[in-house]
Image (cartoon, rainbow, N blue to C red):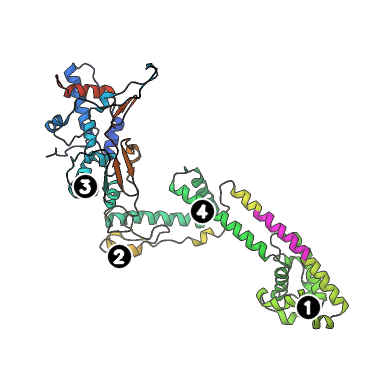
């Protein structure tokens, strides 16, 4: 029977455990050097044994551990043909004091980061969630041999290393705060959209590249650049003499003014990218008007798409139409076409230059201000967690935040872990992969390569304590004659 897990993460005792618990991290943070001052040799050995055993197999009873202890420690060292060992670091043999425990299945599970503590790894094994070489093993003390492959059910790994799943009421309370924060953001954006936009972009740019929000911003930037190139290509393709003539005729058709009262300013909408071309556009309009083929009454109120037939007749008159045309009309159409060719060439250049400026702005990793961005923002209806706390489906329908259409942490309420999954807090300081185990997190499999050994300047047994502490602990357990 293992020891009872009482006061494992006590802040008063300050013991360091083999656990990812946040209180254990605090104990590790505040832990100083083990104090051996003013103690005789036996007291030093006892203190070292007490400290190291709190981390290495604290759930194993002392008598059982002493029967497992091996005084012969494994190590390897490269042969030095020169017989000069001056440049070779000392091999920390005594850090191997607890290496025999690393062969146990529960320890291997914890070292592979398939469980958040040794005790949880033991629980996974007893409950039948662990397989060794394809066979279910229910013994936490099972000794692994080099080459053994073990795996854990992925659901259990996600639960062990994932964020704690909130209850329905807890999730709704968090959603209530999120909704209030969102509504406040929408109010500020409606009052001063440019300031909120610039603040948001500045905040995203200051984030580290590994941050999910920064990744989202970079993907938005990439998508915007792609859209800019698509828009440029589309606009250049539509920049043809026929299209420009259609727009000129549309201005005339949609205008309430008389034909003679139209001015250059009325035709600026045809060449939005370059207003200077409005003079040429107006001249082109006058030339086509002189031909007498444009009947104001016939085109009145029509749009560019409805004027395709007239545009075709003006650009490529039929043989019969040419016979009926006067010489002055032919000259006017010829002059109008010449103007159209010049306008098309100049306007295509203006379009490319305009998009080139946009691309240069994007090189500074920023998004240009969009005046319409705030139109898509809308206030969220407030919720009452107490009323919705009895019906999961009703609560799910009540949440309609931009990036969350479900109760906080309960996207899939049938899962035993936080959904969508995210790692538990304070996991990074414990993310130390062992040298003697090859781990695949994608499949939750691992291969026990060999027993951990010591090399010059390095030991494969992971421990928060240094060589002097392990030396005293080894001295406590070793017996004369062994």
Number of numbered discs: 4
Residue 276 position, x and y percent, is: 75, 59
Of pointers 2 and 1, the one earlier in the residue sequence: 1
Q: Could one spot residue 265 in this view of the protein?
A: yes
The C terminus: image quadrant:
top left
- Name the front one of labels 1 and 4: 1
User: Which of 154 and 436 lies nearest the eye of the viewer?
Assistant: 436
Q: Nearer the viewer, mark 2 or mark 4?
A: 4
Q: Are marks 3 and 4 in contact (CB under 8 Å)?
A: no
Secondary structure under the numbered disc 3 in the rendered image: helix
Mark 3 or 2 closer to N-term?
A: 3
The alpha-carbon separation of the residues under discs 1 and 3 comes to 85 Å
> Which residue in the structure is indicated by mark 2?
393
Q: Which of 375 and 150 lies nearest the eye of the viewer?
A: 150
Where on the picture, by quarter, is residue 80? top left
Is residue 349 inside the magenta stretch? Answer: yes
Report the disc number at residue 124: 3
Q: Quadrant of residue 354?
A: bottom right
Q: Is 213 placed left or right of 331 in the picture?
A: left
Image: magenta residue range: 341-355
Q: Classify 268 as above or below 56.
A: below
x, y percentage for residue 30?
29, 30
Q: Nearer the viewer, mark 2 or mark 1?
A: 1
Q: What whole-number distance in Å separates the C-alpha atoms at marks 1 and 4?
A: 49 Å
Instruction: Tell me the CA gap for discs 2 and 4.
Output: 32 Å
């Amino acid at each position: 029977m293992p020891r009872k897990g009482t006061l494992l993460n006590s802040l008063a005792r300050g013991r360091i455990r083999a656990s990812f618990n946040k209180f254990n991290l605090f104990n590790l943070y505040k832990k100083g050097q083990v104090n051996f001052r003013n103690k005789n040799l036996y007291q030093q050995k006892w203190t070292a044994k007490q400290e190291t055993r709190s981390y290495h197999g604290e759930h194993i009873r002392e008598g059982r551990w002493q029967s497992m202890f091996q005084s012969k420690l494994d190590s390897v060292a490269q042969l030095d043909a020169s017989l000069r060992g001056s440049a070779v670091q000392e091999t920390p043999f005594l850090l191997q004091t607890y290496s025999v425990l690393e062969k146990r299945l529960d320890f291997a599970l914890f070292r592979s980061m398939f469980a958040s503590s040794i005790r949880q790894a033991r629980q996974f094994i007893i409950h039948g969630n662990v397989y060794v070489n394809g066979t279910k093993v229910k013994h936490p003390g099972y000794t692994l041999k080099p080459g053994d492959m073990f795996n854990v059910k992925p659901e259990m790994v996600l639960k062990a290393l994932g964020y704690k799943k909130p209850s329905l009421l807890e999730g709704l309370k968090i959603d209530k705060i999120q909704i209030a924060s969102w509504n406040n953001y929408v109010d500020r954006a409606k009052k001063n959209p440019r300031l909120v936009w610039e603040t948001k972009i500045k905040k995203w740019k200051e984030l580290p590249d590994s941050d999910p929000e920064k990744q989202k911003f970079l993907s938005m930037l990439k998508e915007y650049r792609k859209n800019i190139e698509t828009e440029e290509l589309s606009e250049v393709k539509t920049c043809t003499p026929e299209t420009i003539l259609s727009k000129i005729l549309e201005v005339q058709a949609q205008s309430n003014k008389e034909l003679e009262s139209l001015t250059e300013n009325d035709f600026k909408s045809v060449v939005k990218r370059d207003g200077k071309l409005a003079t040429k556009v107006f001249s082109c309009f006058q030339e086509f008007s002189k031909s007498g083929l444009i009947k104001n009454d016939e085109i009145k109120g029509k749009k560019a798409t409805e004027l395709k037939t007239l545009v075709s007749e003006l650009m490529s008159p039929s043989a019969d139409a040419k016979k009926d045309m006067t010489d002055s009309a032919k000259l006017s159409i010829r002059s109008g076409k010449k103007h159209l060719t010049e306008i098309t060439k100049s306007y295509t250049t203006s379009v490319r230059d305009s998009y080139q400026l946009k691309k240069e702005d994007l090189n500074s990793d920023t998004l240009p201000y969009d005046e319409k961005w705030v139109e898509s923002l809308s206030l969220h209806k407030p919720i009452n967690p107490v009323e919705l706390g009895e019906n999961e489906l009703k609560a799910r329908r009540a949440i309609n935040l931009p990036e969350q259409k479900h109760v906080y942490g309960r996207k899939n309420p049938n899962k035993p872990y936080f959904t969508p999954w995210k790692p538990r807090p304070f996991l990074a300081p414990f993310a130390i992969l062992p040298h003697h185990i090859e781990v695949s997190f994608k499949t939750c499999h691992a291969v026990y390569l060999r027993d951990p050994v010591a090399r010059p300047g390095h030991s494969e047994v992971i421990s928060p304590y240094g060589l002097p502490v392990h030396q005293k602990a080894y001295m406590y357990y070793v017996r004369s004659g062994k």
